[in-house]
């Protein structure tokens, strides 16, 4: 069995279920987590691996060791290096370009292959790209393999100077056993249950979902459940007041992943109209919740943005409109509500797509084989 060190800021943020789906599914790989802090462990247990914090709470043993290496020995990565050597790690896997750059010196010092997965923020914000330009150039030169979620993100890496031979698409993966498939039906006798899941940041496009639903709320009965939180919370709630669209909305805040899945299974339609933010920030790939909703048979309303057209089946499992196109969103929502007899076909198309292209049983084999190929070079 090969040992792979997964390098993260946190193990694990609530929104990073796409990482956990892989970590807890490995069979031929022993994952060793090296993170600066550990959180949400009760939500993301890791029975098949080991977890280390290289910072920890003030006064903890890991905090003392980290400070010893950084402040006394002047070796900022010394604690991580100690763990990697003690665990006899074969491959390093950094989760984000930030951590690929940060841990690159360990890859060269220990002569270990470095895999870096890019997720979006690390290659979309203009300020980030400018700040990391030189570090990314070195990372692309020395790093062994770069993983992306889809073809649009691959194009971004190519534009930044990464050699095409080093880039590989690794799909977001789900364990379908954890997602209950149900055909949606609606006959106009109850409110349609819309759902949004995501951080309250510009790129998620929640304000456009609010505007579109406010247009049709008098014509069709509906409720809108919103799961998430973030810097735009006050702005978005003020927007609802401006639109006179408050009574039908249920703000649930951030929720554990199992409760998110419960809400997905209860809803009729997921609306997720992602956009490119003013600073260039984008999904990079696509929100995992789009795959989770398709796995449950939920019709999707979303946007032509990043790799969203790649992880859905446009026109079959998802109705997509241009970014910020409120009239396009209204048109697609109206179509779904006037043609609810097609929800069964839409839901089945989504489930089939996830089963065929995003099944963790297949994807985990592909990722394991990529690690093995690096060890053969």
Image (tube, helix red, strand yellow):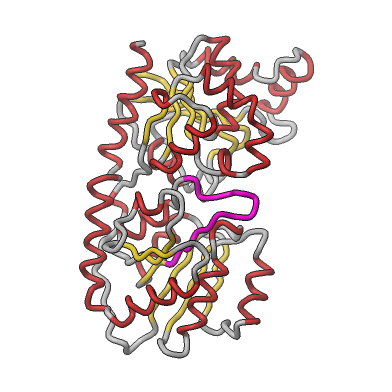
Q: Is residue 167 above or below residue 250?
A: above
At a point 47% along the width and 85% down the height, the residue shown is 217
Residue at 55% x, 28% y is 34
Image quadrant for the C terminus?
Answer: top left
Locate residue 357 relative to residue 166 in the image: left or right: left
Where residue 100 appears, x then y in whole percent? 55, 27
Q: Nearer the viewer, residue 218 or 157?
A: 157
**Percent x, y of residue 24:** 38, 37
Query: Of residues 128 and 45, which is closer to you in this image?
Result: 128
- Which residue is at the far front? 159
Is 132 left or right of 123, judged from the image as shown?
right
Indicate whether 376 appears above or below 229. above
170 left or right of 238?
A: left
Residue depicted at x 28% and y 60%: 180
Q: Camera-side residue: 208 or 47?
A: 208
- Between 152 and 247, the one lying in front of the other is 152
> In which quadrant of the rendered view does residue 294 lie?
bottom left
Q: Identify the residue at horizontal 49%, vertical 38% (top origin).
A: 156
Quadrant of the image for the N terminus? Answer: top left
Tell me, yes or no, whether the highlighted magenta stretch contains residue 205.
Answer: no
Q: Is residue 59 above or below residue 310?
A: above
Q: Which residues are magenta?
A: 271-284
Tell me residue 61's x, y (percent). Answer: 68, 26
């Amino acid at each position: 069995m090969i040992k792979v060190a997964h390098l993260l800021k946190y193990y694990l943020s609530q929104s990073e279920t796409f990482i956990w789906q892989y970590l807890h599914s490995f069979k031929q790989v022993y994952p060793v987590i090296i993170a600066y802090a550990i959180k949400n462990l009760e939500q993301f247990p890791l029975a098949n691996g080991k977890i280390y914090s290289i910072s920890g709470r003030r006064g903890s043993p890991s905090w003392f060791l980290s400070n010893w290496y950084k402040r006394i020995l002047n070796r900022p990565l010394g604690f991580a290096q100690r763990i990697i050597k003690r665990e006899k790690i074969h491959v390093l896997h950094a989760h984000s370009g930030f951590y690929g750059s940060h841990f690159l010196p360990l890859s060269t010092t220990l002569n270990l292959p470095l895999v870096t997965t890019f997720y979006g923020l690390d290659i979309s914000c203009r300020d980030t790209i400018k700040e990391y330009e030189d570090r990314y150039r070195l990372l692309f030169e020395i790093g062994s393999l770069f993983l992306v979620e889809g073809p649009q993100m691959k194009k971004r890496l190519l534009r930044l100077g990464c050699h095409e031979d080093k880039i590989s698409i690794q799909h977001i993966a789900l364990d379908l056993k954890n997602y209950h498939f149900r055909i949606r039906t609606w006959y106009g006798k109850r409110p349609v249950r819309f759902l949004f899941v995501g951080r309250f940041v510009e790129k998620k496009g929640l304000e456009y979902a609010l505007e579109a639903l406010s247009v049709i709320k008098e014509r069709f009965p509906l409720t809108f459940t919103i799961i998430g939180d973030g810097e735009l919370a006050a702005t978005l709630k003020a927007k609802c007041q401006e639109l006179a669209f408050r009574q039908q909305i249920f703000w649930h805040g951030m929720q554990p992943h199992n409760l998110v899945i419960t809400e997905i299974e209860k809803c009729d339609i997921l609306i997720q109209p992602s956009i490119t933010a003013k600073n260039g920030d984008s999904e990079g790939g696509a929100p995992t919740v789009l795959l989770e909703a398709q796995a449950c048979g939920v019709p999707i309303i979303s946007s032509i943005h990043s790799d969203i057209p790649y992880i859905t089946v446009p026109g079959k499992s998802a109705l997509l409109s241009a970014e910020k196109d409120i009239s396009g969103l209204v048109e697609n929502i109206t179509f779904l509500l006037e043609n609810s007899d097609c929800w069964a076909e839409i839901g089945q198309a989504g489930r089939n797509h996830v089963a065929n292209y995003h099944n963790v049983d297949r994807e985990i084999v592909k990722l394991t084989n990529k690690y093995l190929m690096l060890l053969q070079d």
